[in-house]
Amino acid sequence: MSATEVRLGYKLTEVGVIPDDWEVTKIDKIAEKVGSGITPTGGSRVYQLCGRPFIRSQNVGWGQLLLDDIAFIDEATHASFNSTEIKSGDVLLNITGASIGRSAVADQRIQGGNVNQHVCIIRTHQEKIAPHFLNAVLLSEFGQRQIEGFQAGGNRQGLNFGQIRSFQVPLPPLPEQRAIAAALGDVDALLAALERLIAKRRAVKQAAMDALLSGRVRLVESGQWTADSSAPSSVHRPLFTVRYKLTEVGEIPEDWEVRRVQEIAQVKTGPFGSALHERDYVDDGTPIITVEHIGEFGIAGESIPMVSETDKKRLSAYELKEHDIVFSRVGAIDRNALIQSNEAGWLFSGRLLRVRPDPDKVYAPYLSYHFHTRAFKERVKSVAVGQTMPSLNTQILNSLLVVIPPLPEQRAIAGVLSDMDAAIAALERQRAKVQAIKQGMMQELLTGRIRLVK
């Protein structure tokens, strides 16, 4: 941007256009400490069940502390690390590995703990800069660009203290810093509440899967659907006396069956590598699904390759229909996804297997949920071939055992779980909207385009 484009009340600086009453500084000028710790001798073997918190890179998220798997060290080890003791208000920045650039502010939960060598403590002069404001700058698009720039040279493995000290920071007056941090903190609180709710819904769904797909909770009796007509579709009136039988896959209801995949579906391997190459991909055509696009319960990813109409016709044997299920054939072999109506007509690649259920024998959404049970995934892993790269083939997948309730109950089970998936998806969309709002707020507030304090 040229000087003539700078509006009244703003100035052009090395960090871009900012208000006249803001400054540009470096972390070196506003921090009393920049440093990291070390891992205790003996590594994880010396970790304790309680004691002093020991913060590793996995405990520092994007603006929040992740303390579910926090480690602890004893007092003697802590005493030997006294230069790395955490104080409330310290900004913790991941400086190595895949999580480089993540940061969060230390609070009372980890005060008095220590960090390892992958986490840097930035202890600010709080009369100059608010810790939560600095944390917001580090996590902003501008901050992440600086971190990426430091890695663009020869130091791709991590950040050194000199680079961190040279990090440039736009600096509003302290009251405005606090106002910006508070506004962003309110959005963070909403995101945290959504995360907790999503986690709770996922846990409830997992419990429902365990109960419904094992037959411990029944939704129908004598093949008749018993929905409570006065209740929503996700609430059902079940629970009657059930007899169970012991099978090759454990105890199941007496009226359920155990079948091999080949008895209820057709399995087909994707085209061999010689049939399709990356050079065959086009900008506009028919999507072809690869291993990378199989999400937890559906097709994920935006950069799905496409093939021409000519190649689609040539590969018509590998076309997908609604309610087909695609399986990863290599690597994460327990990963699979149900094909939806908008994905019908797509193709699948050679690293996948297609399962086409027989609708007279099994309801495809039920089978997809069954494929996602922990028990079935363990069966898949137990029969996979290959040491370094586990793999599946048609013969192996065909031979696997699946549990089959009567068709009405299959539909009922899939309906309950589908309702739960829809509720989770709605929350995830809401979270994505809030995240987008926060990114927009950061861009406006951290450049001074929107002022919170006059």
Image (cartoon, rainbow, N blue to C red):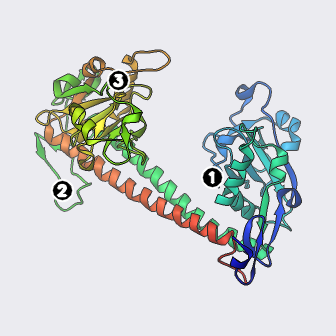
- The mark found on residue 106 in the picture is none
Residue 191 located left or right of residue 71: left
Q: Is residue 384 above or below residue 165?
A: above
Q: Residue at x 42, y 59 (%)?
A: 429
Q: Is residue 366 visible?
A: no
Q: Secondary structure at mark 3?
A: helix
Q: How many marks?
A: 3
Q: Is residue 451 visible?
A: yes
Residue 214 or residue 262, whichever sits in front: 262
Q: CA distance from mark 1 to mark 2?
A: 44 Å
Mark 1 or 2, nearer chain start: 1
| Residue under label 1 | 62
Residue 3 located left or right of residue 309: right
Mark 3 or 1, nearer chain start: 1
Residue 436 or residue 237, whichever sits in front: 436
Q: Is residue 329 above or below residue 138?
A: above
- At label 2, counting other C-alpha atoms closer than 10 Å, the crowd grade (few under 14, some 14-19, many 20 or more) is few
| Residue under label 3 | 274
Residue type for callout 3 = Ser
Residue 409 located left or right of residue 369: left
Q: CA distance from mark 3 to mark 2?
A: 55 Å
Q: Quadrant of the C terminus?
A: bottom right
- Where residue 81 sits, quadrant-wise, is top right
Q: Residue at x 51, y 55 (%)?
A: 195
- Where residue 13 sits, quadrant-wise, is bottom right
Residue type for callout 2 = Asp
| Residue under label 2 | 228
Q: CA distance from mark 3 to mark 1?
A: 43 Å
Q: Secondary structure at mark 2?
A: loop
Q: Residue at x 13, y 47 (%)?
A: 225
